[in-house]
Image (cartoon, rainbow, N blue to C red):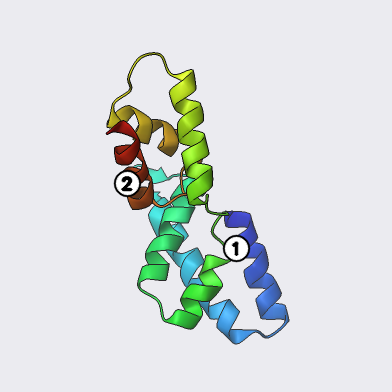
Amino acid sequence: MKNRVKQDMMTAMKEKNVVARDILRVLKGEIERNEQSSKGKVELSDSEVVKIIKKLIENSAPEEAAFLEGYLPKQLTTQELENELQGFMEWHQGEPKMGEIMGWFKKTFDGRYDGKELSKIVREYLN
């Protein structure tokens, strides 16, 4: 994901696409800032980069947010979430708790679903 941002920023610079270049510079800067720690530079995972993008989208103008959304992975639909939940329930032994289900989704599909929507679906399923 970080490589894509860097490559797209270089392309925007070559094409003199000022809007894309500026948005990608901000994103690249945020990624680099988050890679700094007291122990030195750390490598961010794609899911951590997705979190940074989502945070930027929340604080951006609509045009910038629409551009940044192109860097997010495809989100699971409600039907796909329900299907994955059903598959998990068939696979899991016993009656899992909300935390177990949410943890499995986070580990398996991090950044590809809306947590509030999933929470609602899981609660309905467990009740």
Residue ID at (47%, 31%)? 86
Name the amino acid type tagged 2. Answer: Lys
Q: Earlier in the sequence, mark 1 or mark 2?
A: 1
Comparing 12 with 42, the one in front is 12
89 w.r.t. 2: above or below:
above
Comparing 83 with 34, the one in front is 83
The furthest residue to the top: 93
The x, y position of residue 89, in whole percent, is: 43, 25
10 Å neighbourhood of mark 2: few (<14), some, or many (≥20)? Answer: few
Name the disc covering residue 87, or none.
none
Res. 24 in view: no
SS under mark 1: helix
Residue contact between numbered discs 1 and 2, judged by CB atoms under 8 Å: no
Which quadrant does the N terminus fall into? bottom right
Residue ID at (72%, 82%)? 15
Name the amino acid type tagged 1. Answer: Val
Give the total of numbered labels. 2
SS under mark 2: helix
Occupied quadrant, residue 93: top left
The x, y position of residue 46, in whole percent, is: 52, 48
Name the disc covering residue 5, or none.
1
Left or right of residue 113: residue 4: right
Left or right of residue 113: residue 96: left
Left or right of residue 24: residue 8: right
The x, y position of residue 34, in whole percent, is: 39, 55
Comparing 53 with 11, the one in front is 53
Res. 55 in view: yes
Q: Which residue is mark 2?
A: 120
Comparing 59 with 39, the one in front is 59
The x, y position of residue 121, in whole percent, is: 36, 43
10 Å neighbourhood of mark 1: few (<14), some, or many (≥20)? Answer: some
